[in-house]
Amino acid sequence: MITRLHCKIFWACLILATSHTPLEAHHANSAYDRSMDLTVSGTVTKWQFINPHAGLWLTAINDRGASQEWSVEFQGTLDLYRHYSFNKDTFRPGDEITLIGNPARNGDPDLSARIVIFSDGKEVDVRNIPD
Amino acid sequence: MRDSFITKISIVGSIFLILPSLASTQSPPDLSGVWQKDFPGNSQLVPEPPLSAWGQERFDLAKPIHGPRTTPPTEANAAELMCFPMGLPGTYYRPRPFELVQLPNRIVMVFEVNNFWRMIYMDGREFPELPLHSWNGYSIGHYEDDTLVIETRHIIGWESETQQRWIDRLGHPFSDELRLIERIRKTDEGTLENEVTIDDPIAYTEPFTGILHFRETDYELAEFICQELMLSDLPEMRPGQ
């Protein structure tokens, strides 16, 4: 069970997760801290629906009012397509979304996606692969 | 008396002559379908692969991106990180399905990862006298009752610290001398068992065998071009960084 907070501004929530579904990925996600969750809300600027990992970029406003560009790593296209019906049109520039994921260990504004919350409130847990 | 003896000999001889042709007319087991691995990608064939000194030296140089020795991608030397094929049996450890197609004289395995195919010749041929080493080697096979037996040789072995060749995702190396034996059968309608034997006298002190399981899936294979990472703007995905 993962305790989760949602924040109106990015960066605000560093949450310890007590249980995570392991995700097999191209590079085992060693670059990301799997013990922590970070929530980022912002505006989509780019969506790269490619392999071996799709990427999403969004601009978020931090609690000091400054904007910052975040990159978010997803699985490859076929996992996203088969299990969550994602495709190249799932995100468009200008979309307002919230991402919950694991932060980069090096402190850069990079995230490994775990949960996507769309503007209509729909939540998709992109780690919940039935394989 | 003598005629009776000749008759018996004739009957026995005929049986020996007929048996092989009866066997050859037996229907091969139906192994066709789309199969997805049913084991962790960071597992290994046996708990302690019997590494030779040659093998141990190269195992120590491996910087995998899975398992207990996971290395950050910027420092790792796993072939898959650069989208190179993993060879066999390494490719089975990737989390992507493959389709097995049985034709009269050959079997085709189509792996979704890297869109690669593998041909297994079932026409009784021998290995080519002049080996053409390749990432996935040369495979010949035959059926033994309900089991497809495949032997693969001529897989490009471990070359250098930056050109790694592993039997799994954990860094266990293999050499050009690898002889890979696979015994594939269905253990039930939805499960494929592959009993994999690694016979590599350079990298290991003795042959060893492990079992990989696959389950049937209704996926339709789709395109997976790993080299798209060259297009990625994600900081972790840029080659050489």
Image (cartoon, coloured by chain):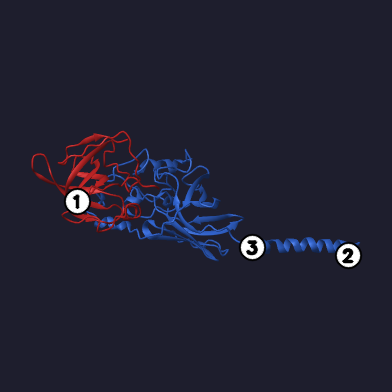
Chain colours: A red, B blue
The answer to whether A2 appears left or right of B177 in the picture is left
Q: Output the chain of dot 1.
A: A
User: What separation in Å lies between label 3 and label 2 (alpha carbons)?
Assistant: 32 Å
- Say few, some or many: other residues with alpha carbon within 10 Å of mark 1 (under 14 / 14 to 19 / 20 or more): many
- Element type where label 3 sits in the image: helix
Q: Nearer the viewer, mark 3 or mark 2?
A: 3
Tell me, for residue B3, which label it has, or none. 2
Tell me, for residue B44, which label it has, or none. none
Residue B212 showing in the rendered view: yes
Q: Nearer the viewer, mark 1 or mark 2?
A: 1
Q: Which residue is mark 3?
A: B24
**As shown in the figure, which amino acid type bears the numbered disc 1?**
Trp
Mark 1 vs 3: CB contact within 8 A: no
Asked where in the image residue B16 lies, by quadrant, the reply is bottom right
Q: Nearer the viewer, mark 1 or mark 3?
A: 1
Reading the chain from its start, which is encountered first: label 3 or label 2? Answer: 2
Q: Which residue is mark 1?
A: A57
| Residue A36 vertical position relative to residue B181 in the rendered view, above or below | above
Q: Position of residue B127 (x, y in %)?
A: 53, 61
Q: Output the chain of dot 2.
A: B
Asked where in the image residue A5 lies, by quadrant, the reply is top left
User: What separation in Å lies between label 1 and label 2 (alpha carbons)?
Assistant: 91 Å
